Each structure stands twice: as C-alpha cells, then as structure tokens.
Image (cartoon, rainbow, N blue to C red):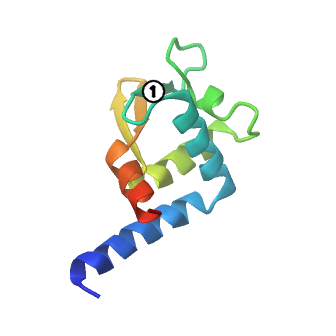
C-alpha cells in the first residue's frame, strides 16, 4: 500500500470514527438536509438569534443539550466533515463539500 493510500485510509477512519457516534451522525444528517454542502449555516449560543440554526435549534428534537452539541460539532470539524468559523457570537458552519465528495468516492 502506498503512502497516499495509507493516508487516505487514515482520513476515512477518522471520518467513520466521527460518524460512529449516533448523536454526531444525527447532527451531520440534520446539517446535510437543511443546507446544501458548502452552504454556510449560522449557529449561535443566543437562541433568539436570527440565523438559519442556533445551537439549541440544531439539537431540537434530538434531546441533545447545547454543550454536548458543541462537543460533537468540534469532533465533526476535526474529522474534516464540517467547517466552522466564528463571527462574534455566531458560529458559521457548513458541510465540507470536498470531504463529502471524497467520502462518496470511497463507496464507488
């Protein structure tokens, strides 16, 4: 196995590890269904914010508290599935379209 193939295996292992947690998979699926990959979604610790989704709303109906959502979003970001950028009180997040394409390619 070449070094690049080995690196890809490690990358996919991290992605699968992140998605192996049911709550992270639920959050990932919520993000992927609410916004097209690459589309920025704003989340905020302020539940009265006007963004597309706030932390409280992202976990709505999933019975996940905001602090746990933040932890899971960090894990999804570290695996490369989700990109996040802080803008003041808001955190913009989006599904990384390149990583999603790589993941789709892995299965084809």
User: x, y percentage for residue 75?
Assistant: 49, 55
Can residue 79 be seen here? The reply is: no
In the image, 64 versus 4, the foreground residue is 4
What is the quadrant of residue 92 in the picture? top left
Left or right of 15? Residue 97 is left
User: x, y percentage for residue 77?
Assistant: 42, 50
Q: Residue furthest bottom?
A: 1
Residue located 52% across and 65% down the image: 16
User: x, y percentage for residue 54?
Assistant: 56, 25
8 versus 34 height, above or below:
below
Residue located 51% across and 19% down the image: 52
Q: Residue furthest front?
A: 108
Number of numbered callouts drawn? 1
The quarter of the image holding the N terminus is bottom left
In the image, 35 versus 63, the foreground residue is 35
Left or right of 26? Residue 72 is left
Can residue 12 be seen here? The reply is: yes
Tell me if mark 1 has few (under 14), some (14-19) or many (20+) residues whose alpha carbon lies within 10 angstroms of its own.
many
**Residue for badge 1:** 41
What is the quadrant of residue 87 in the picture? top left
In the image, 36 versus 43, the foreground residue is 36
What is the quadrant of residue 28 in the picture? top right
Residue located 44% across and 55% down the image: 104
User: x, y percentage for residue 7?
Assistant: 29, 75
In the image, 52 versus 90, the foreground residue is 52
The quarter of the image holding the C terminus is bottom left
Question: Callout 1: helix, strand or loop?
Answer: strand
89 versus 24 height, above or below:
above
Residue located 50% across and 25% down the image: 44
39 versus 71 height, above or below:
above
């Amino acid at each position: 196995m070449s070094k690049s193939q080995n690196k890809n295996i490690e990358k996919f292992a991290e992605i699968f590890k992140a998605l192996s947690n049911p709550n992270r998979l639920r959050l990932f699926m919520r993000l992927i269904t609410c916004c097209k990959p690459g589309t920025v979604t704003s989340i905020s610790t302020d539940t009265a914010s006007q963004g597309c989704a706030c932390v409280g709303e992202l976990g709505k109906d999933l019975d996940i508290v905001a602090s746990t959502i933040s932890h899971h979003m960090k894990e999804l970001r570290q695996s490369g599935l989700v990109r996040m950028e802080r803008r003041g009180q808001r955190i913009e997040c989006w599904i990384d379209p390149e990583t999603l394409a790589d993941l789709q390619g892995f299965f084809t």
